[in-house]
Image: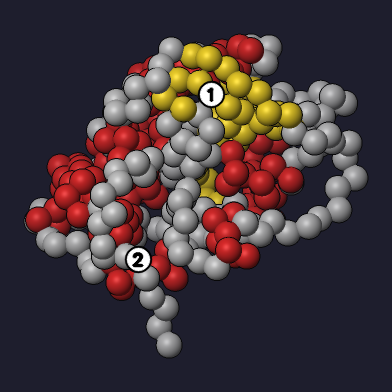
Amino acid sequence: MAESPLERLAGTWEFDFPIHLPQDQLITIKERTVTAPATAPTTETLEVPGARLTYDVHRNDESTEPILFLIASPMAAAGFGTLAGHFTDRTVVTYDPRGSERSTLTEPTIPPTPEEHADDLHRIIQKLGGGPVDLFANSGGAVNALALVAEHPDEVRTLVAHEPPLPTLLRDREAALAASLAVHETYEQRGWGAGMAHFINVVSHRGEFPADFAQQPGPDPAMFGMPAEDDGSRTDPLLGLALVGSIGYEPDIDALRSASTRIVMAAGAESEGELAHRSAFGVAERLGTEPVIFPSNHGGFFGGEYGQTGDPDAFAAKLRNVLAEG
């Protein structure tokens, strides 16, 4: 039996929201034996302009390696449980971006920008000693990380930017932007189920977007096991503020080229042709580099978080090797 679009996408894109899976499947992180010294994470908060940030520090005081940040957006720290467990030999920091889960906005109707997220990261790095840090960033987090490096290159030793969705860098820029914004319009007009079905349709599309893609009706939410009814809420961080705030961002390529940071663009082996995969290649091309191919897909590091499983052991091994090459 052919897999459904939702099954093919599961483990591919960050779903930091429930997708109507059984409760015992939502968070399942496999147990592992760790010999490196490690302590239980401590949770800290930081007041910044417009938000109150929450972040977790998994300390290893015996490590001489730079702090390793694991970030995404709007996905929060909860998505990195498995990946963080592969790096107990060094201090790891995860966080909830402003507007996601534990990090609250002062004004919850204004979309945060990549520049604001970058400033948040800068402030956390400064609170933890000023860096330089190593940084793995996925999806919208990779967009924010590029903004951070453009502004504060001295704070990041190595950035591994995995599949940043940047339609502004694609050959089909206008069609890709229109398709992405149509997701938000569907969400505003018809609610979460319709918006999420439309999102899946866009992010799983392979190849360039036809000029009329944004005008095509979104798929029936029932195809993906999602509710067609609109409950009236408009608080989803992905379909709402995060998408609007970041989708039109254009990285400062000149600043990135001149940065002291080692920038590694990364793409999933199984997501070829998708918007975020193509975007990674777009950034790399402008930087004069070649993307590094990671195992699995857009969410290849998942080990059960949000009901998704990629290839976390191979993904972590690849990340460790890439960081060691710096």
- Asked whether 241 or 133 is in front, the reply is 241
Numbered tag placed on residue 314 in the rendering: none
For residue 229, which quarter of the picture? bottom left
Q: Which residue is mark 2?
A: 226
Give above or below for 201 relative to 15. Answer: below
For residue 41, which quarter of the picture? top right
- Asked whether 13 or 279 is in front, the reply is 13
Residue 13 x, y percent position in the rendering: 44, 54
Residue 60 x, y percent position in the rendering: 82, 29
For residue 226, which quarter of the picture? bottom left
Q: Which residue is mark 1?
A: 53
Please state if 206 lies on the left or on the right of 78 as rendered: left
In percent of the image, x 29 and y 54: which residue is there? 231
Q: Residue furthest bottom?
A: 1
Measure the C-alpha gap from mark 1 to mark 2: 31 Å
Give above or below for 87 relative to 297. Answer: above
Does the rendering let one see residue 307?
Answer: yes
Q: Amino acid at mark 2?
A: Met
Q: What is the quadrant of the N terminus in the image?
A: bottom left
Q: Amino acid at mark 1?
A: Leu
Is label 2 in a helix, a strand or a loop? loop
Please state if 149 lies on the left or on the right of 316 as rendered: left
